């Protein structure tokens, strides 16, 4: 009973807060996160009302609803897979891959250099192993916040299409960078070199994730053909995404080698393959988007409730966090700018794409959880928590501003929720109204 009350209060609080955010011209994502902060253990949750389902009394209580966040991330990745249609890839696939890889690597280098410099200046503040691990975590971008801003404001155009492709590629690259950097960090601490951990396991995880996602995507297409009503096709699609999420959580070990899957990669590959082989996938994806709207609100409210405000009392975390945030922001901006210039993107995209890559959340937190195995892994976790707090509250608004500056969002959202922000469709829509 209390879980249902908690979920309903999270939804209501997030949606009501979005009304206030609209008056301040802020994205709804920011409102959902603030609602979560207010319901969390450092605000309303501290009043002791969690026993009646109002607020969260502890971070553990928020974590008990983690399955909702996992489900939301799965649907987000599945939706992003829709952007990898062959016609899209033919237009900008090569550019997206180059930009996705280069900006992630450049960001990692920027953060590595900054934190290693901090280590040599103040050795007691942060270790070398934690510095290079944080550098790899910096590469990750939050696809959820980006996707929600694009959806809310019906953003459309060359930069939006490129952004969604880059964000998806970014997480795959981030996974490889983190696995390699974390493996090196463990070697530094233990003195034992393990090629299995540094090279083999990351490659196995990516290959297995792509293979599993492809198999489930093909299976979904095969089963969908048995149904013809829209509601049943929607239901079977949702069932298969849940199945994909569940399968991606499987882990096992064979001969000392760890085998696992990346939830984001598996679900993204499932969506990619399904959308490219199914001729009615576009209409179906639109229906899935409508079904998942409340799930995404819950995801961001719970993400806000998970933000640990207690870390703000630790000056060392604030110092390392400030260096991390500045270095990562510069890395994302200049990484995107230089790679866009290299691939001959327009000046507008060169100037604004990097800002839209700043949001950071779930993927980075997952990496930080793994990094706690290091001797001072708690420092890595707290720095990432601090950066997520800043990026998630500021990032969506910056993404919105950049998309407006690029001309791909109508200012102040002066468009119908039913009319895409597409120049051709807008002209047609206006013409129909005039008739």
Image: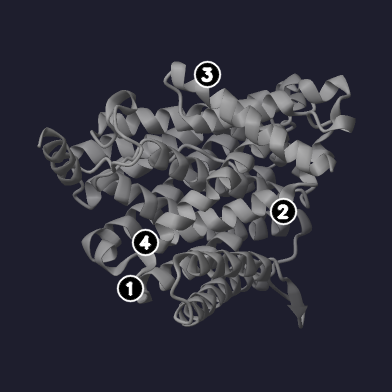
The answer to whether marks 4 and 2 mark residues whose Cβ atoms lie closer than 8 Å is no
Disc 3 on helix, strand or loop? Answer: helix
Disc 1 on helix, strand or loop? Answer: loop
The answer to whether marks 2 and 1 mark residues whose Cβ atoms lie closer than 8 Å is no
Q: For the residues marked 4 and 2, what is the alpha-carbon distance in whole angstroms?
A: 27 Å
The answer to whether marks 3 and 4 mark residues whose Cβ atoms lie closer than 8 Å is no
Marked residue nearer the N-terminal end (1 or 3): 3
Closer to the observer: label 2 or label 3?
3
Direction from residue 126 to residue 268 in the image, left or right? left
Marked residue nearer the N-terminal end (3 or 4): 3
Q: Which mark is residue 73?
A: none
Residue pointed to by mark 1: 279
Q: Which mark is residue 67?
A: 2
Q: Nearer the viewer, residue 143 or 234?
A: 234
The percent position of residue 333, horizontal first and vertical second, equals 38, 36
Point out the residue furthest to the front here: 435
Residue occupying the point 50% across, 40% down: 145
Marked residue nearer the N-terminal end (2 or 3): 3
The percent position of residue 353, horizontal first and vertical second, equals 33, 40
Q: For the residues marked 2 and 3, what is the alpha-carbon distance in whole angstroms?
A: 28 Å
Disc 1 packing (10 Å; few <14; some 14–19; many ≥20): few
Residue pointed to by mark 3: 20
Q: Which mark is residue 283?
A: 4
Disc 4 on helix, strand or loop? Answer: helix
The percent position of residue 165, horizontal first and vertical second, equals 37, 55
Marked residue nearer the N-terminal end (4 or 2): 2
């Amino acid at each position: 009973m209390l879980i249902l009350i908690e979920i309903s209060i999270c939804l209501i609080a997030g949606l009501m807060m979005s009304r206030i955010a609209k008056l301040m011209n802020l994205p709804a994502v920011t409102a959902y996160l603030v609602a979560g902060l207010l319901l969390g253990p450092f605000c309303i949750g501290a009043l002791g009302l969690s026993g009646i389902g109002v607020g969260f009394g502890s971070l553990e209580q928020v974590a008990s609803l983690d399955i909702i966040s996992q489900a939301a991330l799965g649907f987000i990745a599945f939706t992003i897979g829709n952007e990898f249609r062959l016609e899209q890839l033919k237009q900008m696939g090569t550019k997206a891959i180059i930009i996705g890889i280069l900006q992630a690597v450049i960001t990692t280098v920027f953060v590595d250099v900054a934190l290693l410099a901090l280590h040599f200046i103040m050795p007691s503040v942060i270790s070398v192993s934690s510095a290079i691990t944080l550098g790899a975590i910096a590469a990750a971008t939050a696809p959820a916040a980006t996707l929600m801003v694009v959806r809310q404001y019906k953003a459309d155009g060359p930069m939006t299409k490129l952004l969604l492709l880059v964000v998806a590629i970014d997480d795959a690259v981030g996974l490889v960078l983190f696995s390699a950097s974390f493996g090196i960090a463990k070697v530094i601490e233990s003195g034992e070199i393990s090629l299995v951990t540094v090279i083999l396991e990351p490659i196995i995880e990516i290959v297995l994730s792509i293979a599993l996602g492809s198999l489930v995507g093909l299976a979904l297409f095969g089963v969908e053909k048995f149904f013809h009503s829209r509601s049943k096709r929607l239901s079977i699609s949702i069932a298969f995404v849940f199945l994909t999420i569940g399968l991606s959580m499987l882990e096992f070990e064979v001969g000392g080698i760890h085998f696992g899957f990346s939830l984001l990669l598996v679900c993204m590959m499932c969506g990619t393959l399904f959308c490219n082989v199914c001729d009615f996938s576009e209409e179906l994806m639109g229906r899935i988007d409508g079904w998942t709207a409340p799930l995404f609100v819950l995801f961001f409210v719970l993400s806000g409730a998970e933000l640990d405000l207690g870390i703000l009392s630790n000056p060392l975390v604030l110092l390392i966090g400030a260096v991390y945030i500045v270095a990562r922001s510069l890395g994302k901006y200049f990484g995107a700018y230089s790679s866009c210039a290299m691939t001959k993107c327009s000046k507008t995209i060169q100037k604004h794409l990097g800002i839209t890559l700043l949001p950071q959340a779930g993927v980075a937190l997952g990496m930080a959880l793994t990094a706690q195995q290091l001797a001072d892994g708690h420092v890595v976790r707290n720095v990432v928590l601090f950066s997520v707090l800043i990026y998630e509250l500021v990032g969506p608004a910056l993404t919105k501003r950049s998309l407006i500056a690029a001309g791909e969002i109508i200012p102040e959202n002066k468009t119908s929720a039913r009319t895409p922000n597409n120049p051709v469709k807008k002209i047609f829509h206006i013409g129909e109204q005039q008739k």
